[in-house]
Amino acid sequence: MAELKILVVDDEPGIRSGVSRILRNFRVSYPFMDDDFTYLLREVASGEEGIEVIEEWMPDILLLDNKLPGIQGVEVLEYVRNRNYDMVVAMITSYASLDVAVRATRNGASDFIPKPFTPQELKSSIENISKQLYLRRITSRMKQEGKKIRYQFLSVLSHELKSPLNAIEGYLKIMLEKGEGESIDNYMPMIERSVKRIQGMRNLILDLLDFTRIRFEIREDKVREVQLGAVCENALGTVQPYAIQRDVELHKEVRKEVTMMADPDDLEMICNNLLSNAVKYNRDGGRVDIVMDSDERSAVITVSDTGIGMSKEEIGMLFNEFVRIRNEQTKNILGSGLGLSIVKKVVELYKGSIDVKSSPGEGSVFTVRLPLKL
């Protein structure tokens, strides 16, 4: 059995005892794991005590309030990040202003659990965090352990493909047995659902191929002068069929002709993922704009949309692997949860930056800055 240590840092006794009560006998199971996750919990009431326990106990998961007596939660978060500790941090606070959320996200917080939370909300967050932690550690070990760990990583993805395959198989059996009668029209909803699930699996496989192409260093033999406008044009052509289906307009603006040193495949991964997400999470009849610009040192790619937008808590989770924003507006949108994590990894490979501005119902703006010269 795989036991994960959770440290709860909160000055409210009711919150601490509530978390411990909810998670004491909770366990998480995945088909790709030999053992279930169980949880060992400790509680402290201040940031200072939290740091002491972190050094002594080294938890796997840190549930951290921001509004604490003495040092604040974001300062504890900075402490963890500066020491590069292998733990996942989630902020549990009702005081998370936009500034706090941005600061916490920059310092490594992977989730926000707003107070008050229900037992199911807390369990769902812990389940998601546990999967993140498992995948992150598997990815790290891949550098050293080769094929064995790659096989485990692929088993995670096979789990993600299992549900749509089961659904398609069920629909096909109904059609083979003519369970809905003789008319083909009776089966059209099943056919449409099957096609949608096949599209989702195809996108997952394409994302996986991109994910496996990400390297830990830039391949110098692939680097050359690249016209960013040409890369953007190719990406627009790739996304255009999907945009037509959604009745979403695509617009390109080149404020400056940008030539930069890069691997063109890396730039295509950035543009393709940003544009496809902008279409996917848009409204029917919406609009996507991609703007290319530059300053003295950086190429600037901005992708904006008129879509459903995101809350600050959702933005905080956006770039984690296999994490998808789930709410009423996204529940029927298929995706792998890999696209934006791929973008972030490639941007970081080039020592660039990515910034997100978004509000629910008001669309999103993604801005990527990449150095013109390596």
Image (tube, grey):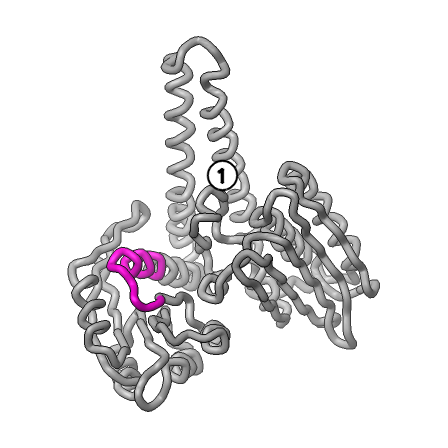
Q: Is residue 341 visible?
A: no
Coordinates of residue 100 in the picture (x, y in percent): 46, 77
Q: Residue at x 37, y 50 (%)?
A: 152
Residue 334 relative to residue 213: left or right: left
* Residue that mark 1 sits on: 201
Image quarter of the N terminus: bottom left
* Residue 204 included in the magenta stretch of the image: no
Identify which residue, 279 or 269, lies in the foreground.
279
Please identify the dominant SS of the magenta region.
helix
Count of number-bearing discs: 1
Res 79 quadrant in image: bottom left
In magenta, the rendered stretch is 114-129
In the picture provided, is 195 more to the left or to the right than 47? right
Give coordinates of residue 164: x percent, y percent. Answer: 42, 35
* Quadrant containing the C terminus in the rendered view: bottom right
Residue 350 in picture, x, y percent from top left: 64, 68
Seen from the viewer's position, the closer of residues 191 and 312 is 312
| 17 relative to 151 in the view: left or right | left
